[in-house]
Amino acid sequence: MHLLDLLRIEIIRSLFDKEKADIPIVAMTANAFEMGMNDHIAKPIDVEKVEEVLVALLKE
């Protein structure tokens, strides 16, 4: 994960508007959870897994 990606996540998570700060962020890296993201989708892409993750996040 690149430094700019980490900065973007940090900026989003620190927004004053909590609805925007809590927007789901799904990563394609193994360090997803320790970097403040909601979930992780491994490569190669499994379409069923993508759908499962998105449905779960949209229900929250």
Image: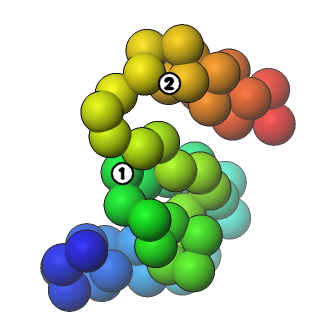
For image coordinates 33% across by 80% down, the residue present is 6
- Residue 53 - label: none
Residue 56 makes an appearance in the image: yes
For image coordinates 43% across by 82% down, the residue present is 10
Label 1: how many Cα within 10 Å (few below 14, some 14–19, many 20+): some
Under circle 1, the secondary element is loop
**Relative image position of residue 46 (x, y in whole percent):** 42, 22
Q: Examine the image and state in which quarter residue 7 appears.
A: bottom left
| Label 1 sits on residue | 28
Vertical arrangement, residue 50 with respect to residue 44, above or below: above
Whole-angstrom CA distance, mark 2 to mark 1, is 11 Å
For image coordinates 62% across by 56% down, the residue present is 38
| Label 2 sits on residue | 50
Residue toward you, 43 or 16? 43
Q: Quadrant where the C terminus lies?
A: top right
Q: Quadrant where the N terminus lies?
A: bottom left
Vertical arrangement, residue 46 with respect to residue 19, above or below: above
Of pointers 2 and 1, the one earlier in the residue sequence: 1
Residue toward you, 9 or 44? 44
**Relative image position of residue 2 (x, y in whole percent):** 18, 78
**Relative image position of residue 25 (x, y in whole percent):** 49, 52
Label 2: how many Cα within 10 Å (few below 14, some 14–19, many 20+): some
- The amino acid pointed to by label 2 is Val
